[in-house]
């Protein structure tokens, strides 16, 4: 990876409630704006380093994070132009500015008049994750709605000896599962075509929601038991012999085909949204566990913009990992889960 930027992460911390989920680096040396971008099938993710406003000190800056729908890439380009324009460092001319990207380099080069260096997507994902895990306290957390405090943060960063090996399940439009055995050594061990793009596509067909965030909001209000066939619907209660509760999903959308045509039209958007979200999440949690078992890995990180800090998604993934592993493995989430590639770039 050429020309990699480095950070002094001493005293680095997440700035709560900031617009761009910023991470502060109070000891980092002053430098011009640096930009990394990860252009995916659905979203373009942008990470940029900026100096603290109204600061003339030699140190202090922050990482900022935002995203755009790929079909509206022109909005992303205009945003990047504005970032570059506002950069008050006069020692770097616009023509010499370097932008790191995991794809789409030619378009960015033509539109922004910058030097675009294209980086490997998988490598960037791992570099981004390792940076957050090793350098940023309170970045990693577990999630369970059954606990009094659903989100439990890892207060300290993890040493390399504790971290490896691990699996990253990166859920974007599709899904990649990557095993990392040591710093700089990784391999893609699996994946799935059923990812965020699948949910987005299906819900675009059956709801009036215009954006993925609107679809996730619908799912928060839904009741999947109105469309999913549950264990209790088949057996009248729990199937205790094999460890299945009556609320376990036996067949996603399994009640719909039994409805009369006129009743199918009455199915609520909220209910179908929640059902399909569970369908994707439950499928991925089982695949992730099977991969972890096959490769004898105890740490499973979930990343990608599919998650977006959405409670239903995180709880579904957590429950699946906990159920299949009989409580021996916990799903690990990140506060900047959708920006690993852009950060690594």
Image (cartoon, rainbow, N blue to C red):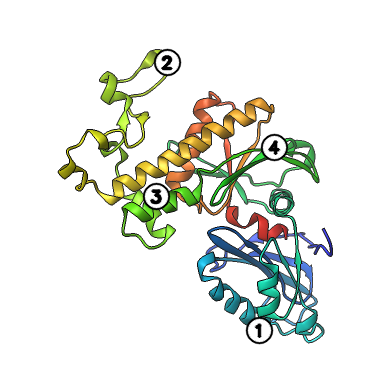
- Up-down: is 86 above or below 315? below
The C terminus: image quadrant: bottom right
Compare residues 189 and 155 and report the one nearer the observer.
Answer: 189
Q: Which residue is mark 1?
A: 86
- Picture quarter containing residue 232? top left
Q: Bin the neighbour count of mark 3 within 10 Å (Cα to Cα): few under 14, some 14-19, many 20 and up.
A: few
Q: Is residue 8 left or right of residue 36?
A: right
Looking at the image, residue 168 sits to the left or right of residue 11; the answer is left
Image coords of residue 79 (percent x, y) = 58, 77
In this rendering, would 92 be left or right of 255?
A: right
The location of residue 292, given as percent across then percent down, is 64, 30
Find residue 91 and report its horizontal and vertical position in percent. Answer: 82, 84
N-terminal of the two: label 1 or label 4? 1
Q: Residue at x 35, y 30 (%)?
A: 251
In contact (CB < 8 Å): disc 2 and disc 4: no
Q: Quadrant of residue 40?
A: bottom right
Mark-to-mark CA distance, 1 and 2: 61 Å
Q: CA distance from mark 1 to mark 3?
A: 40 Å
94 sits left or right of 149 in the view: right
Q: Residue at x 50, y 54 (%)?
A: 308
Residue at (31, 33) in percent of width and height: 254
Judging by the rendered image, the residue that carries numbered circle 2 is 242
Q: Which mark is residue 166?
A: 4
Q: Nearer the viewer, mark 4 or mark 3?
A: 3
Of the residues tagged 1 and 3, which is closer to the observer? Answer: 3
Work out how far the residue at label 2 is from the one at label 3, CA to CA, in angstroms. 32 Å
**Residue ranking furthest to the bottom:** 90
Would you call the spot at circle 2 few (<14 residues within 10 Å), some (14-19), or many (20 or more)? few
Q: CA distance from mark 1 to mark 4?
A: 40 Å
* Mark with earlier residue (4, 3): 4
């Amino acid at each position: 990876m050429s020309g990699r930027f480095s950070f002094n992460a001493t005293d680095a911390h997440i700035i709560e409630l900031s617009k761009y989920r910023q991470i502060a680096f109070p000891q980092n040396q002053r430098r011009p704006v640096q930009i990394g971008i990860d252009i995916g099938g659905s979203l373009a993710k942008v990470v940029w380093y900026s100096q603290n406003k109204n600061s003339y000190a030699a140190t202090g800056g922050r990482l900022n994070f935002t995203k755009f729908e790929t079909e509206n890439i022109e909005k992303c380009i205009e945003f990047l132009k504005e970032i570059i324009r506002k950069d008050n460092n006069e020692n770097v001319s616009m023509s010499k500015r370097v932008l790191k990207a995991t794809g789409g380099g030619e378009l960015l080069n033509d539109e922004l008049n910058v030097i675009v260096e294209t980086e490997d997507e998988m490598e960037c994902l791992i570099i981004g994750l390792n940076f957050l895990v090793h350098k940023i306290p309170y970045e990693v957390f577990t999630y369970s709605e059954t606990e009094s405090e659903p989100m439990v943060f890892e207060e300290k960063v993890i040493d390399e000896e504790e971290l490896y090996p691990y699996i990253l399940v990166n859920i974007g439009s599709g899904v990649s599962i990557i095993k990392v055995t040591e710093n700089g050594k990784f391999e893609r061990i699996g994946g799935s075509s059923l990812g965020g793009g699948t949910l987005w596509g299906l819900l675009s067909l059956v709801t009036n929601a215009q954006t993925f965030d609107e679809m996730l909001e619908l799912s928060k209000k839904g009741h999947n038991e109105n469309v999913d066939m549950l264990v209790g619907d088949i057996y009248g209660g729990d199937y205790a012999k094999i460890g299945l509760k009556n609320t376990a999903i036996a067949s996603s959308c399994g009640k719909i085909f039994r409805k009369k045509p006129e009743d199918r039209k009455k199915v609520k958007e909220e209910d179908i949204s929640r059902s399909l979200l569970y369908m994707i999440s439950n499928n991925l949690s089982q695949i992730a566990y099977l991969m972890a078992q096959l490769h004898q890995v105890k740490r499973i990180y979930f990343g990608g913009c599919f998650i977006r800090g959405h409670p239903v998604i995180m709880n579904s993934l957590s429950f699946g990992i906990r159920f299949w592993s009989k409580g021996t493995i916990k799903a690990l989430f990140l506060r900047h889960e959708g920006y690993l590639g852009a950060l690594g770039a």
